[in-house]
Image (cartoon, helix red, strand yellow):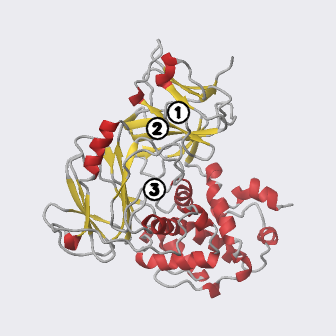
């Protein structure tokens, strides 16, 4: 069998996904990869890279987000609540695929030394959710309207193995890891009046160490580390780390952020290549001649999951999965979501179908006009809200005369005489009488993302497949 770097990279990486070598002999793979002895260790190393990708990415994200002296924009020191005050506009470039539906209320904090207490105010029936992610990106708790209602709530987030007493009225949420990322989202219509209401709610949130609960507390000023790269995207920083630096960091992080009990069989294999939880990485157990290939092949294994993972659905040109937030031992899915959507919710809270091509499989382009038609009674079934967001080819908002970056029921959508609803996706206005249903597009290529927050779990539902995404069709003359 003739293998070239081109066909392995473009089409053959499905052979690597899942680390299956059943169709190729080890000698053939070893020859291509330039590895003689040690091929089994090479695959173990790529498995370990995939396994650790969420923990390493979470740490690198934490470093960048918290490497400031005080809260500013999307960044704030450890233990400080970061409150986004308005939706980003078309000039925003900090994070890809921003949303124009919820205002984030977030914080990174460390529960290794003592618990932290989060006080959530009465949200007055407003839709909101406050997922808490551990260091491995799993959503271990998610208070909010769906799960705990909208009344005032107080939680103590405790670390692994913590034992102690909590004040009356404070409920314990135990984090499996020391690092915790609160990634709260509060629905907002985006009007000046609604911004003001949400700002009042945000200002009532409190996050304090347990030892300061009930006392006056001011979060300390953050310490800035000038060696941290604050400009390069986190994913790029992670992907370009060499294998030794990557595994060294992974082992260091696992001391404070232990893997789950279910990970034991996988971890037992990694001991052979110097990766043992609670211990420093031992690079002497890995051959230096193939280490440089590990990140490259492992990242390819992660990204090929779009095409080969059975839990990634492709429906009428929309790609999505309902396996987010809780991953168990599906390490490839966990790594994929880390790479493309760090901080993703549980599917009961949100599903994010994304589309780059129309019903005929052609890239979207602003030179054309498109329609997405929902049959009568078949708008996206979401108990929180739904929206369709427009992005350019880089997953950023598109400048347009309406300053409209997403479209949803809050635009007072007009129905057709038969009860169906058309969304007009195009560069120029479809006419004043149809502008309520218009999602402006750029001149060039673009990408669509449908958000369903609190999707219905009864029929019809995207979670059980009883509701199908309609295609986006090109309008012909």
Q: Nearer the viewer, residue 111 or 257?
A: 111
First in sequence: mark 1 or mark 2?
2
Q: What residue is at 61 percent from the left and 81 percent from the top?
A: 273
Q: Which residue is mark 1?
A: 469
Left or right: 254, with 245 as reference point: left
Q: Residues within 10 Å of mark 1 (few under 14, many from 20)?
A: many
Q: Which residue is mark 2?
A: 462
User: Is residue 221 shown to the viewer in this render?
Assistant: yes
Q: Residues within 10 Å of mark 2 (few under 14, many from 20)?
A: many
Q: Which residue is mark 3?
A: 343
In x, y percent, where is residue 286? 66, 82
Q: What residue is at 20 percent from the left and 71 percent from the top?
A: 212
Q: Nearer the viewer, residue 299 or 68?
A: 68
In x, y percent, where is residue 112? 34, 75
First in sequence: mark 1 or mark 3?
3
Disc 1 versus disc 2: distance between alpha carbons?
8 Å
Q: Is residue 370 above or below residue 12?
A: above
Helix, strand or loop under label 3: loop
The answer to which quarter of the image holds residue 1 is: bottom right
Q: Is residue 195 above or below residue 118?
A: above
Helix, strand or loop under label 2: loop
């Amino acid at each position: 069998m003739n293998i070239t770097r081109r066909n392995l990279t473009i089409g053959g990486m499905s052979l690597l996904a899942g680390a299956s070598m059943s169709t190729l002999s080890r000698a053939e793979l070893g020859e291509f990869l330039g590895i003689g002895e040690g091929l089994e260790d090479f695959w173990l190393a790529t498995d370990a890279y995939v396994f650790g990708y969420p923990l390493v990415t979470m740490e690198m994200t934490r470093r960048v987000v918290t490497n400031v002296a005080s809260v500013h924009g999307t960044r704030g020191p450890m233990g400080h609540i970061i409150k986004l005050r308005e939706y980003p506009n078309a000039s925003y470039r900090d994070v890809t695929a921003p949303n124009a539906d919820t205002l984030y209320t977030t914080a990174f904090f460390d529960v290794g030394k003592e618990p932290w207490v989060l006080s959530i105010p009465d949200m007055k029936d407003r839709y909101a959710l406050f997922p808490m992610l551990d260091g491995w990106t799993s959503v271990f708790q998610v208070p909010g309207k769906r799960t705990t209602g909208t009344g005032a709530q107080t939680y103590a987030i405790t670390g692994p193995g913590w034992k102690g007493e909590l004040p009356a009225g404070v409920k314990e949420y135990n984090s499996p890891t020391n690092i915790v990322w609160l990634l709260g989202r509060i629905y907002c219509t985006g009007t000046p009046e609604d911004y003001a209401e949400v700002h009042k709610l945000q200002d009532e949130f409190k996050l304090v160490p347990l030892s300061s609960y009930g006392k006056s507390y001011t979060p300390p000023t953050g310490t800035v580390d000038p060696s941290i790269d604050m400009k390069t995207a986190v994913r790029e920083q992670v992907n370009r780390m060499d294998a030794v630096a990557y595994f060294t960091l992974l082992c260091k992080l696992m001391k404070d952020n232990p893997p789950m009990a279910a990970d034991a069989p996988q971890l037992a294999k990694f001991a052979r290549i110097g990766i043992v939880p609670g211990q420093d990485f031992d690079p002497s157990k890995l051959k230096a001649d193939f280490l440089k290939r590990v990140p490259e092949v492992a990242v390819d294994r992660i990204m090929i999951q779009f095409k080969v993972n059975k839990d990634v659905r492709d429906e009428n040109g929309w790609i999505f999965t309902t396996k987010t937030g809780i991953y168990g031992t599906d390490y490839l899915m966990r790594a994929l979501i880390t790479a493309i959507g760090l901080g993703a919710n549980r599917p009961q809270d949100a599903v994010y179908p994304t589309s780059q091509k129309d019903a005929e499989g052609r890239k979207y382009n602003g030179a054309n006009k498109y329609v997405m038609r929902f049959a009568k009674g078949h708008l996206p079934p979401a108990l929180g809200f739904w929206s369709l967001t427009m992005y350019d080819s880089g997953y950023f908002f598109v400048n347009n005369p309406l300053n409209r970056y997403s479209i949803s029921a809050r635009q007072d959508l007009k129905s057709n005489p038969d009860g169906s609803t058309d969304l007009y996706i195009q560069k120029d206005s479809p006419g004043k009488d149809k502008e309520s249903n218009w999602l402006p597009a750029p001149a060039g290529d673009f990408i669509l993302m449908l958000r369903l927050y609190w999707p219905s779990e009864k029929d019809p539902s995207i979670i059980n497949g009883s509701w199908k995404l309609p295609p986006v069709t090109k309008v012909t003359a």
